[in-house]
Image (cartoon, coloured by chain):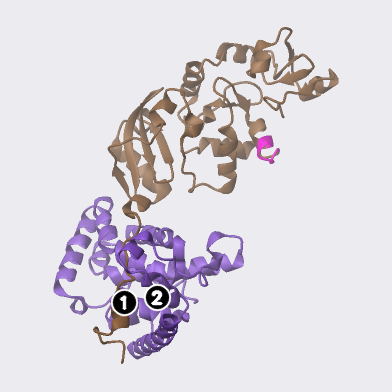
Amino acid sequence: MTGEDSHDPLALRLGGLAVAPPRDLTGSVYGDWTRVDGPVGELLVAFTEVGVSYIRTAASVGDDDDTFRERFHALFQRPLRRASDVPAGLRQALRGHGAAGVAVDLRVLTPFERDVLTATREIPTGQTRPYAWVAHAIGRPKAVRAVGTALGNNPVPLLIPCHRVTRSDGSLGQYVFGAEVKERLLRAEETNVDELLDLARSRVAYVGSGGVYCYPTCTRARTAADPRGLRTLAAARAAGLRPCELCTPAG
Amino acid sequence: MCNAGRPLGVYLSMDDLPESDADNDAVMLAAIVEDIDAGFAGMVRAYQRVVYSVALRVGAGADADDLAAECFLRAYRALLGYDRSRILALRPRSWLLTILLNTWRNTVRGASRRPAVAMADVPERPAPGPTVEDVVTGSETRGELGALVSALPENQRLAVVLRHVVELPVAEIAAVMRIPEGTVKSHVSRGLARLREQYAKEVVR
């Protein structure tokens, strides 16, 4: 017996070990993309079986499908195909409900970038945090600049709300789709942008009340009876205040 | 085990394939040259059964679908760098299986340096047990035969899987494994002899 005998019963049984994969592998290899309405105009959205992987505003790609595809290819090096459906929960999330529950695919990012985006995802709707807060949240307090770069490269804006991260001086700062879009998004979430900018002008970074200090957009600060502005962490500590456990104010 | 740096292309003449497969491949490759994103799905659909079966039976176990998907992704990325004539000259099955085996070896070798990751025990992991469907259709021997195959020494296992599970010609196996045809035949016959011996023991028990 040489193994070349196709009538060999063992060889035949071995042939029975060939099986189709449990799922069509095109689904694991391809990215799917579609257009969907968003809070700042139409969006082009790509997703994989893991989750949403890429979001661009139509305006940011000149309303051109090919530009979107080129950028997707440059970043992901995966084949891309047009989908007829939208990932579960995405439409709701873009209307302001349940963004945290929509799966995202961040596999193309570095561990640092993933950490930055995962921490950013915790910022509640209607609130903002400075870049330094994100840096503290991921245990890299000195990496404030790198945090800014990672947020600028956020492949899934809106779903991961990098528009809620602002400069430590209180000004709104840069945004992947431009500062003007950032302000529109914050206003759409009923963040009190005018008050934030007023505080920034008077260089108030924290709000003290009831023995604790908060970021100005924290629920506790907004409902405080006797709020007072504080310019620095040192001032807050000197006043005998402890950090709020809701908004965990850091540098 | 140290062939990570080898080139991915495997060139044999089209004469080695049955005519219909060669025709299908030519149409598929032309579609990829025309529009890679539209055409690549044809390559995945045509070869996912072969690629997945080899991934499963060489020992990737429950990770076989991830390994097979990774193989296709690497193939796509390689195609991005190939010009038209190189794509049209490809022998897709041998080419994909070469990528698969390189990916598998790299994953296993990478994992052995980081024992915590999921694929660390790939070489030792037995194939999955019989499914409900196997039992219902009376093919429950699939599980134990799969386990015996996965216990073969690596070269015999590869040769047996390529020859008898996915039924490649010896010349193509020689190209994929990068060993002479005579060596392929000897791995296959020694592997089969070992399986026969162990299978008899299992059945008697």
Q: Chain of mark 1?
A: A
Q: Where on the picture, by quarter, is residue A213?
A: top right
Tell me residue A204's x, y (percent).
70, 16
Q: From what the image shows, is residue B10 above or below residue A160? A: below
Colour of chain B in the image: purple
The span picked out in magenta is: A136-141
Q: From what the image shows, is residue B97 above or below residue A84? A: below
Q: Nearer the viewer, residue A107 or A103?
A: A103
User: Does A62 appear in magenta?
Assistant: no
Residue B81 seen in the current view: no
Contact (Cβ within 8 Å) of mark 2 with mark 1: yes
Is A125 left or right of A72, judged from the image as shown?
right
Taking the spot 41% from the left edge, 83% from the top edge, the residue there is B195
Label placed on residue B52? none
Label placed on residue B145? 2
Q: From what the image shows, is residue A61 above or below residue B11? A: above
Is A41 left or right of A131, judged from the image as shown?
left
Q: Nearer the viewer, residue B26 or B107?
A: B107
Give the residue at the far front of this rendering. B205
Taking the spot 69% from the left edge, 13% from the top edge, the residue there is A202
Q: Residues within 10 Å of mark 1 (few under 14, many from 20)?
A: some
Colour of chain A in the image: brown
Residue position marked by numbered label 1 in the rendering = A13
Q: Where on the picture, by quarter, is residue A2?
A: bottom left
Tell me residue A43's x, y (percent).
36, 30
Tell me residue B175's x, y (percent).
33, 79
Please, what is the three-letter code of the amino acid marked with disc 1?
Arg
